[in-house]
Image: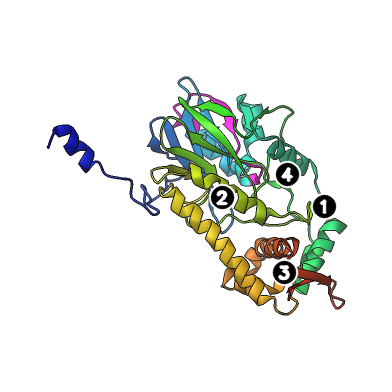
Amino acid sequence: MTEQATLSATTPKPPKGLRYPWDVPPAEGEAIEVAPGVLWFRLPLPMKLDHVNVYALDEGDSWTVIDTGFASRRAKEIWRGLMAGPLGRKPISRVVVTHHHPDHIGLAGWLQTEHGAELVTTRTAWLTARMLTLDVQEVPVAESLSFYRKAGMAAELYDKRANERPFNFSDVVAPLPLGFTRIRQDDVIRMGGRDWDVHIGNGHAPEHATFWSRDDNLVIAGDQILPSISPNIGVYPTEPMADPIGEWLEACERFLPLAREDHLVLGGHKLPFTGLPTRLKQLIENHHSALRRLLAYIDTPKSASECFAPLFKRSIGEAEYGLALVEAVAHLSHLYQAGEATRVLREADGAWVYQRKG
């Protein structure tokens, strides 16, 4: 057997299934190099999902950073420490935001105004974030309260929400100045010495950007693809007849032919992982399975708040209730819009109740 034949015969194939090259994340204020010139660090979040992953790509004389964390004094101090430490005092020339959620865009405006960074994101992400940041509400608006009623929100939680100041984007998102650079499907962007194909996802957030390196095995996935948790997919008062479940499943199916076992996926939360084809198939099947369970469960009319059991298979506390409710609405509305369920307003409480057809 020739040396070349020996090498070919023994070259290992990438292992299938999810694998985590790093068992633990970087400590606060520290970074892990996940690929040449690509640093991974974390910013804290004041919630059950207590962190967001942020990445920095070396541009030689500056850095491109992916996502930012919430706007808070603590987060700014962590950023200043990162700039002085792992980032080696080189400037941040560009901030790339995967999607409009506040844990990802929160400090983008601060990096623009205080540090002169260029903001790069999708048009929908920028417009949505800027609109929500400017839309400060001291009391819940009528449309939100109507949405909660129609979702069947528990009476005690509804009364509490109706009488307290709602969450505002501006609480945790720095003001966004005018001006950004748009990315869209099929663009190619140069970051960290690599060319990246832009592929747009939907469902978790509209026009969510993901980046697939042409030069090595890296995929920057934001929250579109996560390893050990499913991205939250919800319907909100802003677009009560949206179908984010359908949009998210379409994106997963579209990404599947692009996915390789050796792709190192850098997500917005949890740990970097390989085994992307397996994970996409899991996520697709998990939601189809949830829809099947839900369809079987609504043999009698039920509101969104009455459908937590088949969807989540665990008890839902007050801290998780809001996210669980909008996700239940999303799944039920998907069945309704697909023609598999009916819905009517229940006279007793004004909630939409859904029932399996036939």
Of callouts 4 and 3, the N-terminal one: 4
* Residue denoted by label 1: 138
The majority secondary structure of the magenta stretch comes to loop
Of callouts 1 and 3, the N-terminal one: 1
Of 321 and 170, nearer the camera is 321
Picture residue at 54% right of the left edge, 54% below the top: 50
Do tag 4 and tag 2 residues touch (Cβ < 8 Å)?
A: no
* Residue denoted by label 4: 170
Q: Residue 99 in the image: x percent, y percent? A: 63, 42
Q: Amino acid at mark 1?
A: Glu
Q: Amino acid at mark 4?
A: Ser
In the displayed structure, 19 sits above or below 343; it is above
Residue 40 colored in magenta in the image: no
Instruction: Kindly report the distance in space between the C-alpha atoms of the residues bearing marks 2 and 1.
Output: 41 Å
* Residue denoted by label 3: 304
Residue 46 lies left or right of residue 279; in this view the side is right
- Judged from this view, the residue extending furthest toward the left is 1
Q: Amino acid at mark 2?
A: Glu
Query: Which residues are the magenta region?
Result: 83-102
Name the mark nearer the viewer: 4 or 3. 3
